[in-house]
Each structure stands twice: as structure tokens, then as C-alpha cells.
Image (tube, helix red, strand yellow):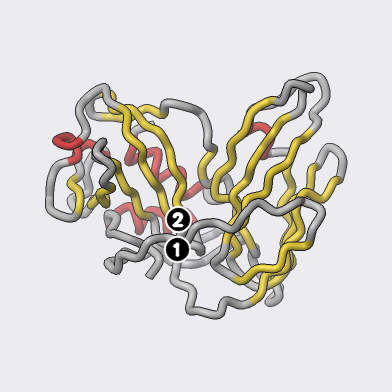
Amino acid sequence: MLIVGVIVVAIIVTIALLQRDKETKSQSVTPSTSPTPPPAPDQPTPASELVTMEVAKAVMVTVELDFGTKVPSIAEGLTQIERRYQPDDGQGRTFAILDAYGEPTPDGKLHMSMHVSSEKPGGGQLIFKRTGEVLWRGKINPASQPVQPKNLTVLIDNGKGTNYTVDGSTNPASVIEATVKPGSLPVKDIWPDGEERELTFIYSACGCPVHVLVKRAGDRTVRVKDTPVIFPDDPAAVTVISRLMKW
């Protein structure tokens, strides 16, 4: 499987409940125990080209957008990107944006990179609402290998270049109260108060990592930067992550 660890059952159930009535997907979120390194995303592709890819792959879409006199934040800019889906089976979405980051350019545009993960066969487009410009066009084919259900996994860097999987099986009040695998060290023992750590979140068909720089502040954590914007197309997952991280 593409997931590399186990996440708390209570969190998994929460995501499943929050997503039950979503029109986009109905996949259950279940724990995983088979560690497999996630695949690297494909190379950035010019927005004018039709991208052909399989399910459970990823591509980086990088654009420069003109919003006029006021350059928005990345989060605000994402709200002006329309997602269009043409699923082969007529149901749900065909892709998801996993994260996005960028900054204003010297000439007053917004430089933005979006990490797109393919989810099911069909077509998909990203449209800039302000101008109607097609930023990305994708043709998604069936996967050549079995696709595993999406599972939320959280990895934490111990500050020495080693990643541990957060084990929330005891339903901790926050990530600081959880333990890590391998072994059973408490997170608070490997993450000193006030220090920054890179956390990795995995919740995608492609098993691609989303990296966030986070600082410990007592029994909670705070983000060091507002970007990347994580999982903008999966608000239920963001809710669970925010609860665990106490953001």
C-alpha cells in the first residue's frame, strides 16, 4: 500500500463521517500497516498541454495569474480556480489539489504552484475564473496497478533526518500527546518545546507527501508559514488535521 503508517481510528472515523454526504467521493478512511515510500510527483507541465496520466499519479501545475491591482494570498487565489470534472462513470471528481504555494511576482501577478493528484478515469480542467483561461487539462486513464483507498497518515521529523509515523491509537488530545512508530516514544520527547519540525501529511490517491513546517508551543503546534495551503479540496481531512495539531 502507498501509506506508510497507522493513524488513530477515531480520526479515521471522523473523516468518514464528515465525508459521507460529500458529492465528490465516498471512499472510507481505514488504517494501513504496510510502509511503502510515496512516489514522487511528475515534473511540472506547461498549462497549454493536455496531460495524459493514470489514476494515482500526480503533476505540478505552475501558473502566473493576473488579479488586477490587488494580489491575493494563495488561499484566496485558490478560490478563483474552478475545478471541472468529466468522470468516465459520470459520478464524482477525477482529481484533487493536494497543496498549493507561491508568491507575488515583481510585475504584480500571483505565481502559484498546485500539486494535482489524479483520482479516477475521465477528464479534468483547472479554469481561472477571472479570465476563463484553461490552466490545466488532464486526461486520466485507469491505473495499471491496484489503487488503494486514501488514508490519512502523519509523519514527524525528529530533527535528525529521521521520520516517525504518528500513532494516535490512544486518541490523544493533541499530536504532542501521541506516540510514534517504530517504537513507542512520546512525541513530546522527540520534539522539544519551541523547536520547529517538518511534518508530512499523506492523504491522496497517489500517496504523495505534503510538507508543512510547524513549531511546538507547549501542548499545541503552530504553523511557521501560511503556505503551503494543504488539501483545499478535502476540508474534512483539514478539519481532522487541525484538531490533532491544535491549529
- Residue behind mark 1: 150
Question: Considering only vertical position in the picture, is 11 above or below 122?
Answer: above
Quarter of the figure with residue 138: bottom right
Q: Give the residue type at disc 1.
A: Lys
Q: Give the residue type at disc 2.
A: Tyr
| Count of numbered circles on the image | 2
- Residue behind mark 2: 203
Residue drawn where x is 59% and y is 41% of the image? 100
Of 206 and 236, the residue lying toward us: 206
Residue drawn where x is 79% and y is 29% of the image? 67
| SS type, badge 2 | loop
Q: Quadrant location of the C terminus? A: top left
Q: Is residue 122 left or right of residue 220?
A: right
Q: Quadrant location of the N terminus? A: bottom left
Lower sequence index among marks 1 and 2: 1
Q: Is residue 63 left or right of residue 17?
A: right
Of 16 and 216, the residue lying toward us: 216
Question: Considering only vertical position in the picture, is 106 above or below 140?
Answer: above
Residue drawn where x is 79% and y is 58% of the image? 49
Q: Is residue 16 left or right of residue 178?
A: right
| SS type, badge 1 | loop
For disc 2, the neighbor class at 10 Å (few under 14, some 14 to 19, many from 20) is many
Residue 194 in the image: x percent, y percent? 26, 22
**Real-space Cα distance between discs 1 and 2?**
6 Å
Residue 216 in the image: x percent, y percent? 28, 28
Question: Considering only vertical position in the picture, is 27 above or below 236?
Answer: below
